[in-house]
Each structure stands twice: as structure tokens, then as C-alpha cells.
Amino acid sequence: MRTITLTNGSSVTLDGDLLTVLETLYMELTAKHELARTFEDMNREIQHLIEQMSDEERRQYLSESLFLNMVSYENERLGAYMKKLSETETEKG
């Protein structure tokens, strides 16, 4: 497994697990700064990580990211549908 770094020098292991990268970004940019980070801060850090990745690593992480986002999107849609069904049942009942 290869290791890349954040701008603060913290290591990120590229083990194929997107959640490892997300957790590291969260801990180093969000938690350590008590939620005081901007969109630009996070975007700059993500761009820094991407620049260190090979084309194959970028493809792998993009694929995993799209999959994770699709699952999240489906869950949000299902949640909204279930809420609507519940409200309809409450109105009938």
C-alpha cells in the first residue's frame, strides 16, 4: 500500500478504501479544527490528495466515490418515500 500526505504532513494510506481517506480528512481538517474549516479548505486538501494519486488510483477512488454517493442518494430517496407513506397513513388513520 502506498502512502500520500495532506498539506499538514499527515499520512493517508491508499488501501483502496474511500472511507479511510474520508476519515483522515475529517479528523485532520474538521475535528482538529473544531469544525472551523471552509469549503475552500476541504476542496484544496482534496485536490492536493488527487494530485499525488496515479491515474489508476484516481479511477479506483472515483469509482468507489460514485458508488458510495449512489447508495447515499438511494437511501435519501427511500427515506423520503417512507416518510411520505407514513404521513399518508397518519392522515388516513
Image (tube, rainbow, N blue to C red):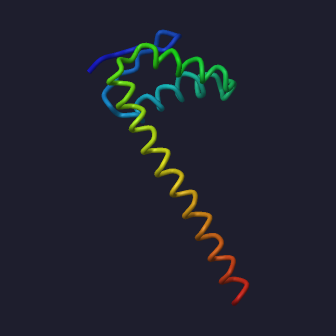
Of 52 and 15, nearer the camera is 52
The quadrant holding residue 85 is: bottom right
Residue under the point 35% across and 34% down: 17
- Residue found farthest to the right: 91
Q: Residue at x 54, y 52 (%)?
A: 73
The structure residue drawn at horizontal position 52% and vertical position 58%, both measured from the top left corner, is 75
Residue at the extreme bottom of the image, as rendered: 93
In the picture, the quarter occupied by the N terminus is top left
Residue sitting nearer the eye, 29 or 16? 16
> Where is residue 41 shown, x and y percent of the image?
64, 20
Give the image location of residue 64, x and y in percent.
Answer: 39, 38
Report the side of 47 relative to 2 (left or right). right
Q: Is residue 74 above or below residue 9?
A: below
* Residue 61 place in picture, x, y as percent: 39, 31
Name the residue at 45% across, 41% down: 66
The quadrant of the rendering that contains the C terminus is bottom right
| Number of residue marks | 0
Residue 16 falls in image quadrant: top left
- Nearest the viewer among 47 and 79 is 47
The picture places residue 70, in percent across and down from the top left corner, at: 48, 49
